[in-house]
Image (cartoon, helix red, strand yellow):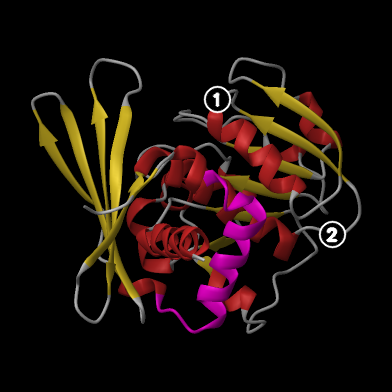
Amino acid sequence: MLPFLDHHQVMALTYAGAVQALRDALLAGLDVDADPARTVVPVPAGQLLLMPSSGARYTGVKLATVAHEGTPRIKGVYVLMDAATLTPLALLDGPALTTLRTPAVSALAVDLLAPTTPARLVVFGRGPQAHGHVTATRAVREVTGVTFLGRGDDPAPVAEADIVCCATTARTPLFPARLVRPGATVVAVGSHEPDARELPAELMRTVVVESVPTALREAGDVILAGTTDLIPLASVVRHEITVPDDRPRVFKSVGMAWEDLAVAAAVYEAQAS
């Protein structure tokens, strides 16, 4: 039988380990634009989401389900395979993998974009992803204070923040752009829908994204703002492009299959060692 790597085994990689796995994948020359588009299949009880990706050593696919009813709403598994033979190697807890990789992607962006000085962190959201972003940010920066804000809360604390993370289901901007300090870093991960956004258009002048084609297809923050100055995350990791520092630095993530593959492979290798 295939080994099943459960929540605890997936999370044992740690956010720091996941950040390193993502960085290594990009430094190795991974073509993130080679990922096929996320497939969403409606079914009577909700949706099936299929996210396949393939690399030099491993191939994998995440099968996630979003149910209309029941708790938790999001379930699923990840199938990791050998790239050369397509032999299945392991199954991983899908929600745990997402819980690990999403904040890790944000933390990689923060590590590239934010000053190395101690940071005050504001997080929009109160769920697992919001708390995961705090832990992941602490893996790459010293955090001197954390403020959690809900969608209906006064956004005034943003004015004092060095790093702002948005992990909500909001469909309209969470705060006005004028609150964000020029040296702050803003991360938004809450949506992969073209008609939903967490950030105001005025903030979206230059934006770092996982993939330009994917952002133009899925990132409502980018699409609704009409942003054209998009910088691939891989180009920043590889020091090919310098992000302007005369304005807030913004990273918009929609979540991509290559990220799941990189982290799933690192989890598998860590458990096999």
Q: Residue at x 32, y 57 (%)?
A: 217
Residue 54 x %, y %: 30, 72
Q: Quadrant of residue 257?
A: bottom left
Mark 2 element type? loop
On residue 127, which mark appears?
Answer: 1
Residue 106 x %, y %: 60, 52
Q: Is residue 149 left or right of residue 82?
A: right
Mark 1 or mark 2: name the one nearer the start of the chain: 2
Residue 209 x %, y %: 52, 61
**Callout 2 amino acid:** Pro
Along the line of sight, which residue is nearer the eye, 76 or 200? 76
**Callout 1 amino acid:** Gly
- Is 249 rendered above or below residue 56? above
Specify the segment rendered in magenta: 11-31
Q: Residue at x 58, y 20 (%)?
A: 151
Mark 1 element type? loop
Along the line of sight, which residue is nearer the eye, 5 or 51? 5
Residue 212 x %, y %: 43, 67
Q: Quadrant of residue 244?
A: bottom right
Residue under label 2: 115
Tell me the chief SS of the magenta region: helix
Q: Is residue 206 visible?
A: no
Q: Is 262 colored magenta in this rendering?
A: no
